[in-house]
Image (tube, rainbow, N blue to C red):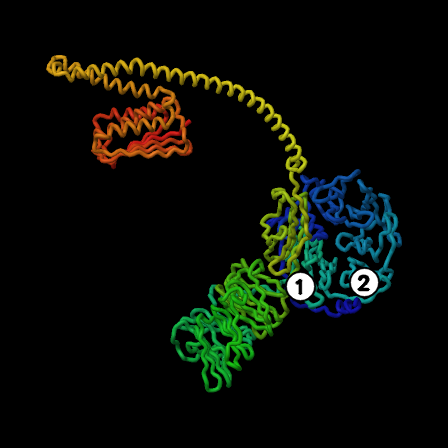
């Protein structure tokens, strides 16, 4: 295998054109300085670069710069090497060797400022090339790097020395191969010439190796495979094993020498230096394709190349003194070549080596073999192409009728077809379709199939036709001319509105307005959510010559391969975002047409996804910093998934779980380019612990403390309540005694008033009544005075009677009040034309009214009854008393004429009634709109 590779290297050289895209990074797009030096890629995938203004870490998007303010002793960083994971050794001009660990400068004991310009890592020490003829060994210790400085001089062979005064000193270049240091001639800076290759055994010992190279001036050395190397001379390459030269190849580069190389897989990079100056160029050789690509002196800004290497994704990086960094990446075969921009193209069709595009008013033709184009202009509004038959391309228009004239473009006839769309025609069969019908002519007979919905497209495949409608997919057998199968959303596809269909053996790809459905035998797979499509609204499908499915959507196009969608050119302004048709010509070129012209893609090689972006995730407790490393120009998608939830887009570089609810989580990250597979991270387990004050033991302590405190508070509260209850009991007993004494006083007062004042008023009333009935007194001048005395005595008697009744404590019972009011009402209305009724609804047998209520309620409703008798002209009145849930309601109402309160001239009676209700804090409502209704309500305390 190795011998075959070397034979290819030796005998396949020829000059042709390889397609590389050059990306230039300099101070205008993020680099701190255009003077750039050593460049490497670490194990995680980051690019590291030394510049005249600090060390640069690059992830493909952002430049992170380390300078003096971050701890560097000098901003002139010439080289960098990876020591181990997240640890790097920095070679600076003036700052010596420094260590960067996890993006922080780590000081070490006995650190010495010096000038070094190249550094490499070995198992026991770091090896660096310094200023003049000095070489530095930095032996690794736990907290220190012990430094030894040597020089090399020629004395028949190469000899190391620690002396500062030595003749014949040389300054060889070095390379680390398989963890060993090899010294050889420095073609760029050394005026001396050193023949052969030497291996460094220790600071004081150098051993010549590969004796078959001892007479060669070697400019670089690299390993190809196990026991297989190549060495670079000024004008060629020597392939050898550890024991012998296998072969040699000489190049004829004019006026140039090969200074250094880099090789990875089938790609070799050669740095050429002109003999008469310092100008250089880079040549990239693709061994497998036998193609070369030149990066000229002009493209490199006329500056010297400081370093070259090939990264993990086969990108070539070139750092240049004064022109920044160049990245060479192979042009994707899916690079779009746009054409016919500013044309809204409805349809496209290929006829052998020709392709025809349809706009609203013209046909544009391209002969791909002859690289010619032509067009036909039409007055009609063009719509779409029909089948190509008998060397004639049939054309549909939006008008019901069109010209029947046959026109030509590139020896191809073009004719406007009939109303129906021609799908297929041969000597035995003709198939057409209209908006909602299919017409099949078989022999001399016509067959017609009608649909409820609209037919989007009709596809013939072998002995079946597939009808795409807005009601589903209908499959007809052309042998039996019967419906063989009906596929709708009821069967499980995503939507009944079907735009296109592709048949691949037993597999049917169905494009719907809600995603892609694949039917194979009786199984249906749907792709409609979180699948990578730019749009779920699919317009068209194409199965290319490699068996890979292409999809045109409302927002671009996608490729479906091995259950994964790869989407392209979503944001490219020069390309069509709305893809209406995809076709493939006989030269295996894919053509996509849409709202902004056509796009062409070379499809000779089957699509394969590019390398996935790299995830670099740094976790600090429950915070995740997510860095995505990618050096492609495609859009990057990064998502995360928590537990069993759906994938979510990661909108920032930081995911902070400290703000999440307490509990246990696991999270997974993934990333991809639009044309790569997903790259998944490992699963991270997270426990969001509650703070100490929310731990179970803290809850227990807090609960115990609160319980003790509550118990203590309740105890003192109980004692206080006990004391208050005792005081209250004594107060209640005292009040009961007072109440009893007051009742006795009220009864005595009532009895005294009744016996003394009442009897005497009764006597005055009787005597004055007898006198005014006497005929002698009737004619006397004293009659009016006696009559007045009699009347006042009666009024006073009855008033005193109500007062005596109210101050008697036994009349505080509600039943007594009701009895008194009923008795008063019956007596009052007895001799009138007004019928008096009463209704009593009291929950308890005995209801005790608060003191002073009986008198106020009695006088209030006596006033109401008296007003009804005097003014209402009523025929009926009623008294209603109700006690419910300790609330008293007394209502007196009549069916009289009512009154207008605003028009009353005298309102003393109403005012007195309101005042009496207010005295006992009751609510009085008077409604006189239809009859008169007086309602008192209050809660009995």
Residue 596 is situated, as x and y percent measured from the top left of the image, at 49, 63
Which is more N-terminal, label 1 or label 2?
2
Element carrying mark 2: strand
Residue 850 is situated, as x and y percent measured from the top left of the image, at 39, 24
Labels 2 & 1 near each other (Cβ < 8 A): no
Tell me if residue 579 can be seen. no
Which quadrant does the N terminus fall into?
Answer: bottom right
Element carrying mark 1: strand
- Marks 2 and 1, how far apart in space? 26 Å
> In the figure, 222 relative to 883: above or below?
below
> In the figure, 721 relative to 120: above or below?
above
Which quadrant does the C terminus fall into?
Answer: top left
Q: How many marks?
A: 2
Q: Residue at x 68, y 48 (%)?
A: 685
Residue 60 is situated, as x and y percent measured from the top left of the image, at 64, 53
Residue 177 is situated, as x and y percent measured from the top left of the image, at 80, 56
Residue that mark 1 sits on: 293
Q: How many residues crowd mark 1 within 10 Å: few (<14), some (14–19), many (20+)?
A: some
Side (left or right) of 762 relative to 922: left
Q: How many residues crowd mark 2 within 10 Å: few (<14), some (14–19), many (20+)?
A: some
| Relative depth, front residue between 298 and 16 | 16
Q: Nearer the observer, disc 2 or disc 1? A: 2
Residue occupying the far left of the picture: 779
Residue that mark 2 sits on: 228
Side (left or right) of 285 relative to 221: left
Tell me if residue 889 can be seen. yes
**Res 218 quadrant in image:** bottom right
| Relative depth, front residue between 666 and 77 | 666
Q: Which mark is residue 630?
A: none
Q: Residue at x 76, y 46 (%)?
A: 116
Q: Residue at x 79, y 66 (%)?
A: 2
């Amino acid at each position: 295998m190795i011998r075959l590779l070397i034979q290819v290297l030796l005998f396949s050289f020829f000059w042709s054109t390889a397609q590389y895209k050059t990306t230039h990074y300099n101070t205008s797009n993020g680099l701190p300085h255009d003077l750039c030096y050593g460049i490497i890629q670490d194990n995680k995938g980051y690019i590291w670069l030394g510049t005249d203004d600090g060390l640069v870490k690059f992830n493909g998007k952002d430049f992170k710069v380390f300078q003096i303010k971050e701890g560097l002793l000098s901003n002139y960083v010439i080289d960098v090497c990876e020591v181990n994971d997240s640890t790097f050794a920095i070679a600076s001009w003036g700052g010596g060797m420094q260590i960067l660990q996890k993006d922080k400068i780590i000081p070490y004991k006995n650190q010495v400022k010096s000038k070094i310009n190249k550094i490499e890592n070995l198992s026991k020490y770091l090896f660096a090339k310094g200023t003049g003829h000095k070489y530095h060994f930095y032996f690794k210790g736990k907290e220190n790097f012990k430094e030894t400085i040597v020089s090399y001089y020629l004395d028949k062979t190469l000899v190391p020395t620690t002396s500062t005064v030595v003749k014949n000193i040389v300054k060889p270049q070095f390379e680390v191969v398989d963890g060993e240091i090899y010294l050889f001639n420095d073609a760029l800076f050394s005026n001396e010439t050193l023949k052969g290759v030497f291996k460094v055994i220790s600071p004081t010992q150098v051993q010549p190796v590969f004796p078959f190279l001892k007479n060669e001036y070697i400019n670089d050395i690299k390993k190809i495979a196990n026991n297989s190397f190549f060495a670079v001379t000024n004008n060629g390459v020597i392939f050898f094993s550890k024991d012998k030269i296998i072969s040699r190849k000489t190049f004829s580069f004019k006026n140039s020498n090969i200074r250094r190389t880099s090789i990875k897989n089938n790609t070799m990079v050669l740095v050429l230096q002109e003999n008469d100056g310092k100008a250089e160029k880079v040549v990239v050789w693709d061994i497998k394709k036998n193609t070369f690509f030149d990066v000229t002196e002009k493209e490199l800004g006329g500056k010297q190349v400081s370093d070259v290497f090939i990264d993990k994704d086969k990108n070539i990086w070139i750092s240049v003194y004064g022109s920044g960094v160049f990245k060479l990446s192979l042009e994707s075969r899916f690079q779009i070549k746009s054409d016919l921009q500013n044309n809204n193209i409805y349809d496209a069709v290929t006829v052998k080596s020709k392709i025809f595009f349809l706009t609203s008013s013209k046909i544009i033709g391209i002969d791909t073999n002859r690289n010619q184009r032509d067009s036909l202009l039409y007055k009609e509004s063009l719509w779409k192409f029909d089948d190509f038959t008998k060397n004639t391309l049939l054309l549909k228009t939006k008008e019901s009728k069109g010209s029947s004239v046959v026109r030509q473009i590139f020896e191809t006839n073009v004719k406007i077809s009939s109303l129906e769309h021609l799908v297929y025609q041969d000597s035995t069969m003709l198939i057409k379709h209209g908006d909602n019908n299919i017409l099949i002519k078989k022999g001399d007979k016509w067959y017609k199939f009608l649909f409820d919905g609209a037919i989007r497209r009709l596809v013939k495949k072998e002995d079946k036709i597939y009808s795409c409608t807005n009601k589903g997919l209908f499959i007809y057998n052309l042998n039996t001319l019967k419906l063989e199968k009906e596929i709708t959303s009821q069967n499980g596809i995503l939507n009944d509105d079907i735009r296109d269909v592709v048949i691949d053996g037993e597999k049917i790809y169905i494009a719907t307005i809600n995603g892609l459905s694949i039917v194979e035998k009786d199984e249906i797979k749907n792709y409609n959510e979180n699948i990578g499509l730019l749009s779920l609204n699919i317009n068209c499908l194409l199965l290319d010559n490699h068996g890979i499915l292409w999809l045109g959507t409302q927002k671009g196009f996608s490729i479906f391969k091995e259950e994964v969608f790869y989407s392209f050119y979503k944001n490219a302004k020069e390309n069509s975002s709305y893809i209406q048709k995809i076709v493939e010509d006989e030269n295996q070129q894919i053509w996509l047409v849409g709202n902004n012209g056509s796009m062409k893609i070379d499809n000779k090689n089957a699509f394969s996804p590019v390398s996935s972006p790299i995830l670099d995730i740094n976790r600090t407790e429950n915070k995740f910093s997510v860095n995505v490393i990618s050096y492609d120009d495609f859009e990057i998608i990064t998502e995360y998934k928590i537990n069993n939830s759906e994938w979510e887009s990661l909108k920032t570089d930081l995911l902070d779980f400290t703000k999440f609810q307490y509990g246990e989580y696991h999270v997974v990250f993934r990333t991809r380019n639009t044309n790569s597979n997903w790259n998944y991270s490992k699963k991270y387990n997270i426990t969001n612990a509650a703070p100490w004050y929310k731990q179970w033991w803290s809850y227990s302590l807090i609960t115990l403390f609160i319980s003790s405190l509550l118990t203590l508070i309740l105890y003192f509260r109980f004692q206080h309540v006990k004391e208050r209850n005792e005081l209250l009991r004594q107060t209640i007993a005292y009040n009961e005694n007072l109440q009893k004494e007051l009742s006795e006083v009220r009864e005595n007062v009532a009895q005294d008033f009744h016996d003394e004042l009442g009897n005497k008023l009764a006597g005055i009333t009787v005597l004055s009544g007898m006198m005014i009935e006497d005929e002698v007194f009737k004619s006397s001048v004293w009659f009016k005075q006696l009559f007045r005395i009699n009347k006042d005595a009666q009024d006073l008697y009855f008033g005193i009677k109500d007062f005596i009744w109210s101050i008697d404590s036994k009349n505080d019972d509600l039943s007594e009040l009701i009895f008194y009011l009923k008795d008063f009402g019956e007596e009052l209305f007895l001799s009138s034309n007004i019928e008096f009724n009463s209704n009593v609804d009291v929950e308890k047998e005995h209801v005790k009214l608060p003191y002073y209520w009986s008198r106020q309620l009695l006088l209030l409703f006596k006033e109401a009854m008296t007003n009804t008798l005097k003014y209402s002209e009523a025929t009926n009145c009623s008294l209603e008393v109700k006690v419910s849930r300790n609330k008293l309601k007394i209502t007196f109402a009549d069916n009289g004429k009512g009154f207008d309160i605003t028009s009353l001239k005298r309102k003393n009676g109403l005012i007195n009634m309101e005042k009496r209700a207010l005295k006992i804090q009751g609510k009085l409502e008077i409604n006189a709109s239809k009859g008169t209704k007086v309602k008192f309500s209050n809660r009995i305390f």
